[in-house]
Amino acid sequence: MRRTRKAKLSSVQIIALGFLIMIGLGTALLMLPISSRDPGGASFGDALFTATSASCVTGLVPQDTGTYWTTFGQTVIILLIQVGGLGFMSIATLFLLLLRRRLGLRQREVVVDSISYNQLGGFVPFLRLVFLGTLLAEGLGAALLSIRFVRQYGWGRGIYLGVWHSVSAFCNAGFDLMGPHTGPYSSFTAYAGDPLVSLTVCALILVGGLGFLVWDDLARNRLRWRRYRLQTKVVLVMTALLTAGGGALFFLLERNNLGAGRPLGEQVLSALFDAVTPRTAGFNSTDTGALSAGSLLLTIAFMFIGGSPGSTAGGIKTTTIFVILLHTFSGIRRDQSANAFGRSIGDGALKKATAVLFTNLLLALAGAVAICAIQPLELSAVLFETFSAIGTAGMTTGITRDLLPVSRYIIIFLMYCGRVGSISFAVALLEKRARPPVTQPEEAITIG
């Protein structure tokens, strides 16, 4: 008898399926009576939404995390955040390495894809750097945050809050436990003028959002700029521009709104926090719903851009927007190639960047149209919600808990696409093998 070849799942499909399994497991655990303070246990909708948001490190929540979920439920959430932030394949590989198990070529391919590493060789030392760097960053962040929280809430509660929020910030998740202390859904609004909390959270978000490849480059070459990879240079420059430029814009836009009557130092600190957290952490130190129209639009743009490739952050990534802008300006100047930092960026990168940009944009807009068709909500608030979901940012103007079940499922779908990668999601569904390439006849078309 002739044997039929088993269809192998691609790396992208394995990653997409792995996230689904993780979300399903998280949902089941959060529905247990021990997970919530609701006598009947959490509903399937609330558990699924929260598990998806945690696994996809988004931060949108239908129930306040600190007041609704028990310590057990909060532990499930923070574990989903940690695994979702680093990638479940990375965590699985760590356990295999600790057990001194050798990895096959297939396993290496999947892990490489899951952490956006660019080669099969040398990824074990790279993974070691990722885990040690994560431990160091989260440990230092937890220690700094605990200084403030221990003074306010005592040793046990203070350390718990410090560790929990350090992991949430580093993984760009945006979940918080401040509800019992400063009010439900308050995030870090009570610490808008606190440099220790605000700057520590900002630093954790930025470090987690740089990308592990950038970590590797910085560890190898220290401060020698000329030796950095092109990606490292692009990421560092874009991060600095978005942070400094965004902070200045938020300061100007909110100086006569939320900043009115507040000390200058607190205004600057809040503006910096507002520039950092949309990419894509989801915390807030000011009332997001009260932001000016200009600040809301800027926040949407920052949520859409997100962090950098191979990081804990979401969004279309800083490199994507850099490639599109670079090619745009090169086209305006009629340059023969798009050049940056002494290197040329080809049309292949532009095609990928354009695909990522428009796929995410269409998903966010389609989700907004669908939600508006389902229930009468303000368009700006719905757009803010869908862009927050696709960018896994987790910020909201306050409509998350007002969404109908169908609208919530749309947000769940967008969060999943945003984390797995909208392009990867499409490939996972539509991928076909053994198809011969066919080139169609080329014909000119008028552009512009």
Image (spheres, rainbow, N blue to C red):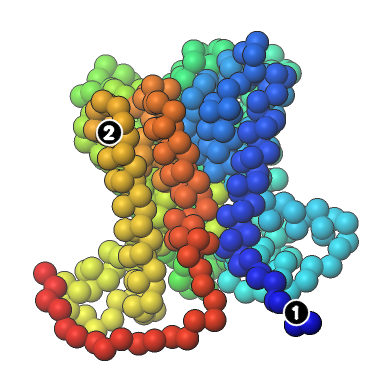
Q: Which residue shows up at 16% across the image and 75% down it?
A: 333
Q: Position of residue 119 (x, y in %)?
A: 62, 74
> Would you call the spot at circle 2 few (<14 residues within 10 Å), some (14-19), or many (20 or more)?
some
The residue mark sitting in front, 1 or 2, is: 1
Mark 1 / mark 2, whichever is N-terminal: 1
Residue drawn 61% across and 41% down?
A: 23
Residue with the mark numbered 1: 3
Secondary structure found at label 2: helix
Amino acid type at mark 1: Arg
Residue at (40% x, 55% y) in the render: 316
- Which residue position is annotated with label 2? 372
Report helix, strand or loop for mark 1: loop
Which residue occupies the foreground of this view, 155 or 47? 47
For this orientation, the residue located farthest to the right is 100
Above or below 181: residue 167: below
Does 285 appear above or below 126? Answer: above
